Image (tube, rainbow, N blue to C red):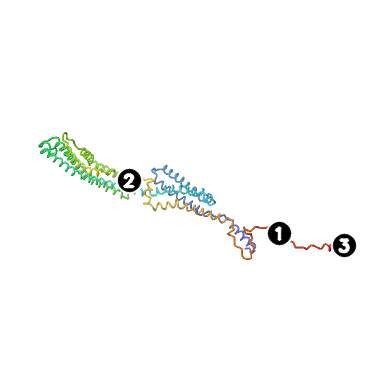
Amino acid sequence: MSNNPNMSDAHHNERVKLRRDKKPGRPIEETLIAVLGVFSALMLGISLSILSPESGPMATIKVLLVTASAGLVAFAVNHFAITKGAKQAAIGFGLAGVISVAGILLAGSGMYIGAYSGLVHDGVHERTLEDNGAALSKYMAQANRVTLEAGRAAPALKLIADELEGYAVCEAKSSCLSQVGRGGYGPVASVMHKLASRSGSIASAFEEGDGQRKNLLPELNRFHTRYQLVLAKEELGLDKKRAQLQTVHINISQTGAALMEALPVGLLAGYVDELDKGVYIAGNRGATARINAILREHAKTLRDILVTLEGEAIEAPSFPKRPGMTDSLRYLLDFAAFAAVIFVAELVLPITFWVLAYLRHVWDIERQLPPAEHDQPAPTPGSVPTTAPSSVVSLPPQITERYVPPEDDSATDAADTARSAQ
């Protein structure tokens, strides 16, 4: 081992020089954006494999191609935005910053929607089937309420039929409506009897429909219970569960339609119009007015029931289709945890890395700038400033000479005469 101090100093200086000449390492944000791109591509690949309706080798190739393309595009956008766009924005090229941030947002949004939709697909599928069960429950409740309201029509129609039949009997006995003659089965009695018979037949139709309602409602409840049982079976796959639930859904829709058709709402609407129009008794205006007044009162009573029956549009909900990307966004709050993590990975982190890179470039530029005048230290008392203040005008240097008084002329002439004589 050499003990020469000069050699040790030279070796030390060489190591220091190598350390100073070493290139700076790769910024951490560039490394993280590369790692993030790999994980984003993996999430997108899993998502697309779940969302793809196809299966087999060709479907796998499609998923791999789309995943690789999307992942490469997203990584390229983020990488160049951070490594190039942030630096250009730092030196004053504002458009580069706008384009960089816009590119990160667009690429991140696409990757976010694609990854989120697939990762929550099964949960969204379950939720749509549960919502369909709730819609079926609402449909059944509405149908039951309408049929219960329709049950009011049969007693009202029976009362109207009895009252009109009573007027027909009264007219036949004593001409209480026409007030012409002393009874007999004339045109007035005939009209009142026909209206009473029609009211009675419609009342019988409603009673028959109410009987069908009592038979169909338990069947509807059984189908609805079956729907809930199938929905709760966790051992069934989504495809099998969906097929069984669709069958139950069809049974509920058909039973509900049969329940609504059992109500003769159309007959009731036609009878109300008939009562509103009234009748005309030839040659007896008084009888016509009295009969029409009675019919209008009955029409008003039946119209209140009819408005209730026709006021609600009772339609069975459609069975939900398989959820896609847009369907998963409707349940964003239900899967907020997944959505937040993917949002941070695809959008928040790239934007954060871009901001950090931008600030780093701005700081580097600030350090390389020469110090400004106001950054120089103030002169100490007694010291000479290196630069003159800007408000003082510098003057050119002046040469000062020692003053020599002029010689006397007579003394000069005497000196010249003495030298010439010598």
Which residue reaches farthest bottom?
Answer: 381
What's under tag 2, amino acid-wise?
A: Arg
The residue under the point 13% across, 35% down is 186
> Could you tell me how far apart the alpha carbons at marks 1 and 3 are, in whole angstroms?
41 Å
Residue 400, position as x, y percentages in the image = 73, 61
| Mark in the foreground, 3 or 2 | 3
Horizontal and vertical percent for residue 128?
34, 47
Relative side of 102 to 155, left or right: right
Question: Which residue lies under the disc numbered 3?
Answer: 417
25 relative to 208, above or below: below
Marked residue nearer the N-terminal end (1 or 2): 2
Q: Left or right: where does residue 251 sit relative to residue 85?
A: left
Q: Give the number of the disc on residue 4.
A: none
Pointer 3 local density, CA inside 10 Å: few below 14, some 14–19, many at least 20: few
Can you identify the residue that label 1 sits on? 398
From the viewer's perspective, tell me whether residue 85 is left or right of residue 291. Answer: right
Q: What element carries label 3?
A: helix
* SS under mark 1: loop
Left or right: 153 as drawn, with respect to 87: left
Q: Mark 2 points at which residue?
A: 242
**Amino acid type, mark 3:** Thr
The Cα–Cα distance between marks 1 and 2, rounded to whole angstroms, is: 106 Å
